[in-house]
Image (spheres, rainbow, N blue to C red):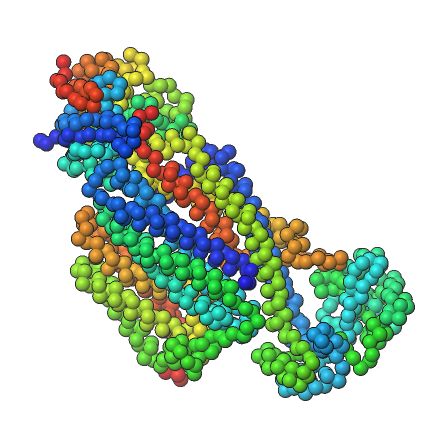
């Protein structure tokens, strides 16, 4: 009961001094908002990576030479398909194309290697020579659309004209923004890739528990191959986004320290009115514990309000506006950047982590100032 | 019946380790009975306020004993000293020491926060105390908008809200005119009739000569000299 | 080091806790050295005031350490996808074995910190604060533990290497493995169930007896029973409680209970378990304080409250353990 009454007094006390508390509340809220943005965005990116990879192949087999990626013989697909537990093995033909006109990199993919689940805006997938389907990003940057022509320069420096038969839907932009799909033969001619080679092999393994075993067997049967499992890719994305997020948080350590100094300064700098008020409280019967509790409640009230406002602001910034500034740092850079709407998600772990990063340092900064205020001598009040 | 307040050879030295150490009370012994109205009289610097602090458990003596309602309080830790002070004594300070941004009622309720009293009960007791000083109609008004006399009545209500046994007043007429001073003394008379013990520090002859006073204790340089009321 | 937000939060929390503990300990030991409650001079008054600061610093440090325990467990849970072979927090802890030491340090900090908090709270209820010296001298034990927590935490997280393949709960808590964890998993189920309920009945019975009788001997027995019950309950989690929640006879991991697809049931389960353990220890502490002046009337109610809390938490634990046994679709009858 005493706790609640003193909480009520603390809240009323905060409202009586809006000016003093507004400054610290503003800075506190900004701190929380920035840190929360990093946490929410990191989590959203990791979730998106998980969702995207869920539909990808369980295992991708690449060939390496001198530590670099090399084209893999198509016959290796038979070797892999013979491993027990392996479903379908698809040699994939794909690669990157640098467009000097727009200074953008496109991903070129053979139509039979493409995921049939990709949705078109309108049109159809290319079927013959001289046809292609493009992503919305390429359409925008090259200012082309359905039935327009697109010229690509092949390995012999000769221009080839492709007619756009389809443009991918915006819902798949994260996958197709920079994608250009053409049939396998024209793609091989464009890259100068021999018919007996492929970029890599996509391996389907029905039983997820077998993936690591199959990967080990692939490595044994094809010593120069590099099997990459879905879980490895996921781990890599997790590590990258965690690292970027953690890096940003570590950079913010300096501003966190500055915030703690500000909190200490504000808490220590009692005005004459506040000092007098505490003296009066002590004189009318509040003891040190009561005033300490008052200060604790004031600190917690400011913390919780800043936390709520900051977190809500960060949530809006990330899931409504896509975090325009920090998002670039976390997602990386590209000329053709897909528009991406992160899926709103909040969990208790993020909230507790954020609380540790913000509320803990603030409370710690205000313990000593709160005590100094609480040990005001009531006898002094009688003498004034 | 044993006295309510017993003070035995108390001394109070402020800042004893420093060159500017001051012995404000230099060996005072006195007793105050329950229901008695006592004045501590003396010029500025005679130790009246310091002795009031010691009697009212606002400070601990450097040496000597203070016994209140049979309990020795001179060696109590601060927390328990505060609890005894809150439950036994009501203070009316020289400057009133009200919080101007709070309402009359909120000021009166301040001593009740540390007590195990519910919010509704707090309001009831505050209003009852305001009734005693005839200020209930102004309960919701901010203290900063009250006159000097009204503010002092709020201070008295605050001092009474915990139903203390002793009311301590330090120079209560210092900022009042004669009319208000007489009104205050009438109020003290009414409180005395309820059995309240009053200890008043003052050098105002109007107070010292009033019939409500049972005894005057003179102080000089931290020492005392008792004399009966005229 | 893996720069994951949860890790940074834990390191920051541990650093802040150590700073608070250090400040409180330095001040507290000085206060304990100069404390003379019989005196009323200025120095004693200053010490009294400083004791509030020391106590505040320690209380906040203990609070942060207590909150960092579930955060640590949750963080190791969140990190497991980064390690090959890890399926839960066990895998993350195995990735750098010093992590297990960290977990025990944190548990110890939680228990000792909780006892200190209670001792401090009770001490402030008594007129002469008779526990001032021992409670502040006890910080000489709490501070090194806090420092150990920070040092081991830094070493643990710095030593985590995602490319190192780790083993997970299947290996650690598998009945065919080696070590204490495997032996716990291999304990026969039926005797373990009986032992758990017998220990619960004994512990609960002692809680009720202590409510009825105020003898300190019963409280000593209660404290011993609490420790024993804690050990048996933890062994039971590995042996059969986890199995009933996972509905897999060979899944004994004590950490998977904390995951979302088991509805985070591990959190209330462990809260009730460790909470009941703490409630069993505190009455012994209060019994030791009985000879202190001013005890009568002030701490009797506190003693009753802790016993009641222990009963509620024990009841909660029994409900959480018994529900899947009695009403779940899974049964271990063929394995009993």
Quarter of the image holding residue A193?
A: bottom right
On the image, the x and y values in percent for residue C138 come to 30, 55
Residue at screen point 44% across, 37% down: A268
Residue at screen point 37% across, 34% down: A278
Q: Nearer the viewer, residue C200 or A354?
A: A354
Answer with left or right where residue A73 lies relative to residue C100. Answer: right
Q: Nearer the viewer, residue A338 or B27?
A: B27
On the image, the x and y values in percent for residue C19 come to 42, 51
Farthest residue, direction left = B1
Q: Is residue C5 above or below residue A221?
A: above
On the image, the x and y values in percent for residue A276 come to 38, 30
Q: Nearer the viewer, residue C28 or A50?
A: C28
Answer with left or right where residue C4 lies relative to residue B156. Answer: right
Q: Nearer the viewer, residue B180 or C71?
A: C71
Q: Is residue B39 visible?
A: no
Answer with left or right where residue C178 lies relative to residue A112. Answer: left
Residue at screen point 27% across, 55% down: C305
| Image label count | 0
On the image, the x and y values in percent for residue C31 come to 29, 46
Q: Is residue A335 above or below residue C32?
A: below
Q: Is residue A240 visible?
A: yes
């Amino acid at each position: 009961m005493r706790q609640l009454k003193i909480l009520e007094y603390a809240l009323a006390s905060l409202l009586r001094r809006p000016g003093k508390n507004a400054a610290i509340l503003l800075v506190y809220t900004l701190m929380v908002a920035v840190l929360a943005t990093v946490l929410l965005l990191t989590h959203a990116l990791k979730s998106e990576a998980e969702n995207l990879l869920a539909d990808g192949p369980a295992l991708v087999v690449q060939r390496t030479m001198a530590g670099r990626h090399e084209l893999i013989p198509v016959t290796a697909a038979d070797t892999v398909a013979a491993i027990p537990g392996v479903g379908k093995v698809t040699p994939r033909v794909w690669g990157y194309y640098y467009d000097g006109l727009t200074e953008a990199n496109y991903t070129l993919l053979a139509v039979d290697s493409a995921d049939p689940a990709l949705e078109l805006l309108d049109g159809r997938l290319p079927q013959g020579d001289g046809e292609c389907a493009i992503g919305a990003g390429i359409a925008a940057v090259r200012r082309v659309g359905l039935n327009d022509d697109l010229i690509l320069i092949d390995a012999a420096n000769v221009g080839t004209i492709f007619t756009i038969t389809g443009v991918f839907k915006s819902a798949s932009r994260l996958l197709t923004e920079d994608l250009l799909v053409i049939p396998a033969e024209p793609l091989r001619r464009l890259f100068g890739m021999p018919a007996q080679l492929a970029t890599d092999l996509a391996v389907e393994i029905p039983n997820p528990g077998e993936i690591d075993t199959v990967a080990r067997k692939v490595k044994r049967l094809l010593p120069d191959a590099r099997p990459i499992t879905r879980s490895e890719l996921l781990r890599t994305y997790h590590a990258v986004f965690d690292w970027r997020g953690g890096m940003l948080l570590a950079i913010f350590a300096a501003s966190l320290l500055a915030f703690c100094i500000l909190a200490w300064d504000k808490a220590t700098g009692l005005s004459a009115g506040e000092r007098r008020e505490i003296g009066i409280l002590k004189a009318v019967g509040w003891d040190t514990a009561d005033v300490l509790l008052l200060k604790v409640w004031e600190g917690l009230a400011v913390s919780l309000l800043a936390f709520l406002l900051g977190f809500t602001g960060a949530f809006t910034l990330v899931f409504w506006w896509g975090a325009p500034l920090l998002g670039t740092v976390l997602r990386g850079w590209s000329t053709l950047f897909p528009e991406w709407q992160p899926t709103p998600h909040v969990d208790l772990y993020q909230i507790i982590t954020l609380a540790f990063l913000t509320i803990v340092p603030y409370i710690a900064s205000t313990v000593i100032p709160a005590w100094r205020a609480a040990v005001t001598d009531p006898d002094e009040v009688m003498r004034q | 019946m044993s006295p309510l307040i017993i003070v035995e050879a108390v001394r109070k030295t402020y800042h004893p380790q420093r060159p500017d150490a001051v012995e404000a009370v230099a060996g005072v012994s006195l007793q105050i009975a329950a229901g008695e109205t006592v004045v501590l009289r003396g010029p500025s610097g005679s130790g009246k306020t310091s002795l009031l602090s010691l009697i009212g458990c606002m400070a601990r003596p450097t040496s000597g004993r203070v016994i209140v309602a049979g309990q020795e309080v001179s060696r109590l830790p601060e927390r328990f000293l505060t609890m005894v002070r809150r439950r036994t004594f009501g203070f009316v300070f020289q400057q009133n020491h009200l919080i101007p941004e709070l309402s009359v009622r909120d000021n009166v309720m301040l001593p009740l926060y540390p007590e195990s009293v519910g919010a509704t009960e707090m309001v009831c007791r505050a209003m009852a105390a305001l009734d005693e000083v005839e200020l209930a109609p102004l309960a919701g008004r901010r203290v900063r908008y009250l006159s000097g006399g009204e503010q002092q009545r709020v201070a008295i209500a605050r001092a009474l809200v915990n139903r203390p046994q002793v009311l301590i007043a330090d120079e209560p007429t210092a900022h009042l005119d004669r009319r208000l001073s007489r009104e205050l003394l009438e109020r003290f008379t009414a409180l005395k009739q309820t059995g309240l013990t009053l200890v008043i520090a003052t050098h105002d002859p109007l107070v010292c000569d009033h019939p409500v006073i049972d005894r005057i204790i003179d102080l000089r340089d931290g020492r005392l000299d008792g004399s009966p009321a005229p | 080091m893996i720069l994951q937000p949860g890790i940074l939060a834990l390191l920051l929390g541990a650093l802040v806790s150590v700073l608070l503990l250090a400040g409180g300990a330095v001040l507290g030991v000085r206060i304990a050295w100069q404390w003379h409650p019989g005196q009323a001079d200025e120095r004693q008054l200053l010490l009294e005031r400083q004791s509030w600061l020391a106590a505040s610093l320690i209380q906040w440090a203990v609070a942060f350490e207590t909150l960092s325990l579930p955060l640590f467990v949750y963080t190791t849970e969140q990190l497991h996808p980064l390690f090959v072979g890890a399926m839960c927090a066990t895998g993350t802890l195995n990735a750098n074995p010093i992590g297990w030491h960290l977990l025990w340090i944190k548990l110890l900090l939680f228990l000792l910190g909780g006892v200190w908090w209670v001792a401090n709270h009770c001490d402030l209820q008594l007129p002469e604060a008779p526990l001032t010296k021992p409670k502040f001298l006890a910080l000489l034990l709490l501070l090194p533990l806090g420092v150990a927590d920070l040092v081991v935490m830094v070493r643990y997280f710095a030593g985590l290497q995602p490319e190192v393949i780790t083993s997970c709960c299947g290996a650690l808590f598998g009945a065919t493995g080696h070590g204490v964890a495997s032996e716990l998993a291999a304990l026969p189920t039926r005797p373990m169930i009986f032992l758990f309920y017998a220990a619960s009945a004994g512990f609960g019975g002692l809680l009720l007896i202590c409510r009825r009788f105020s003898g300190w001997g019963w409280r000593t027995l209660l404290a011993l029973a609490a420790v024993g019950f804690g050990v048996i309950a933890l062994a039971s989690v590995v042996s059969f409680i986890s199995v009933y929640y996972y509905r897999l006879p060979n899944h004994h991991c004590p950490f998977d209970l904390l995951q979302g697809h088991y509805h985070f049931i591990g959190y209330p389960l462990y809260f009730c378990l460790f909470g009941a353990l703490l409630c069993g220890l505190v009455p012994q502490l209060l019994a030791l304080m009985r000879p202190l002046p001013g005890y009568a009337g002030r701490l009797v109610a506190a003693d009753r409250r802790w016993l009641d809390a222990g009963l509620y938490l024990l009841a909660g634990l029994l409900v959480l353990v018994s529900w899947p046994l009695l009403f779940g679709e899974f049964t271990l009858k063929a394995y009993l």
